[in-house]
Image (cartoon, rainbow, N blue to C red):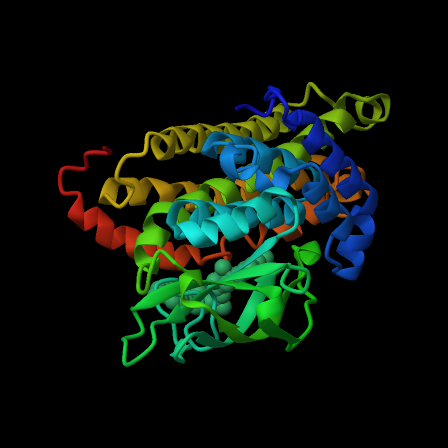
Amino acid sequence: MSTQSQRPGGPDLASALARVREVTEANLARTDRDAAFPVEALDELRRTGLLGLLVPVEYGGLGGTVRDLAAAAQSLGRGDMSVGMIFAMHCQQAAAVVRYADDRLRKELLPRIAAGEVYLASVTTEAGKGGHLLTARARLEATPDRLRIDRIAPIVTGGAYADGFLITMREPGDAADTDVSLVYADRGQLEVTGSGDWDPMGMRASHSVPLRLAGSVPGHQVVGGHGQFREIAGKVFGPLAHVGWSAVWLGTAAGALARVLELLRGPAGRERFDLGSDLLLTRLSRVRQRLDTVHALLAHTVEVVESDEDLSRPSRQLLLNSLKITASEECLAAVDGLVELVGLRHGYLKDSPTRLELAVRDLRSAALNYSNDRLHLADGRLALLDRGVTFV
Ligand SMILES: Cc1cc2nc3c(=O)[nH]c(=O)nc-3n(C[C@H](O)[C@H](O)[C@H](O)COP(=O)(O)OP(=O)(O)OC[C@H]3O[C@@H](n4cnc5c(N)ncnc54)[C@H](O)[C@@H]3O)c2cc1C
């Protein structure tokens, strides 16, 4: 399926995305100013069936591919990076359920996601261990028929509005902190308590609040079985996160460039800017070059992920990490280049139609959203393993 096409009986994805972007646009100034979650855009994602993009058709979903995810995330990122990330992270969670949940949980949950009833939030970051993905401090407690959860979650995008959570927890018993299980919990199975505010530099509409989650779930809600999070992270979570996020960031930078070009080519812009200036043209070229680089790396990575090869191979992990690091750096650098190009009025003031000020603030989070430093450290180790520098 492609975002340009229409599946028989299904929605036209391009027009569904256009509707979400329209609603996003109408609320953007307020959601950014007030650091408010874009409930209207989420309603539209529910209504259009887009929350079920990666849910197989047999469960009522759109049966989309990783390529569809990248295209949709890029499209939403053009309108607003927060909405793009909310969507991409939800899809990443849904894909983990599709691939690793047991039959019972799949049957219980996937039709609800497809129907737009369940928006999923992600809980991996934990107090005390920072962003380190593959460890968990809080331990599941096994009772005769349930698993008890008590988890501090310092940053949960959309957590106040999510209908369900995928949470990393340490296995029950005396397991080590590297024995991590991924557990699904419905909002109704948890007591969700807010434990702080959300007032960040950018990504304000992502409403990524700190929460405490406490409650219990039946055993079949452990996704992929106990201790399997490392495998899920290597094969689904990591790949889809890096593809989805990079697509959103590329969309945000491409949207910024498109709005700057609109300004430059319009009557007011032609009066204000010298389109024949060597400096302007060179700056424009550098911006476009950065975006073409990210676009090419994203397209290649999507092909590799879709080829369903063993993504745990060092060269594959290196590629996925390179995509995330490169996209986070180059998209921000591209928008920063646009600020230099247009100057203060349209590059630095909030009320410019270019929205560069918002794009810079939002994109500054990209390197932090799973720390690039952590990825470089992993990549150094992986590079040592690929002695032949094979790229395959
Ligand atoms: C907008 C946004 C939304 C988010 N949404 C969610 C969400 O929904 N759910 C969720 O669970 N998380 C979420 N996160 C958290 C995110 O994925 C990261 O895990 C988190 O931002 C890391 O926080 P940190 O930088 O404090 O921690 P760390 O990753 O621990 O890093 C702290 C500092 O130490 C450095 N550092 C730490 N360890 C190493 C190391 N081993 N080697 C080298 N340097 C190191 C880092 O570079 C950094 O400077 C979100 C983050 C952002 C920005």
Q: Does residue 239 sit above or below 202 in this rendering?
A: above
Q: Give the camera-side residue of 164 and 152.
A: 164
Residue 271 position by quadrant: top right
Q: Residue at x 67, y 23 (%)?
A: 277
Residue 240: x %, y % from top left:
44, 43
Q: Is residue 226 left or right of residue 4?
A: left
Q: Give the camera-side residue of 348 and 151.
A: 151
Could you tell me if residue 175 is visible in this image?
Answer: yes
Q: Is residue 348 left or right of residue 220?
A: right
Q: Give the camera-side residue of 324 and 284.
A: 324
Residue 249 position by quadrant: top right
Q: Does residue 261 sit above or below 387 in this rendering?
A: above
Q: Is residue 97 left or right of residue 181?
A: right
Q: Residue at x 71, y 21 (%)?
A: 275
Q: Does residue 173 sit above or below 351 in this rendering?
A: below
Q: Residue at x 41, y 40 (%)?
A: 323
Could you tell me if residue 70 is visible in this image?
Answer: no
Q: Residue at x 51, y 32 (%)?
A: 64
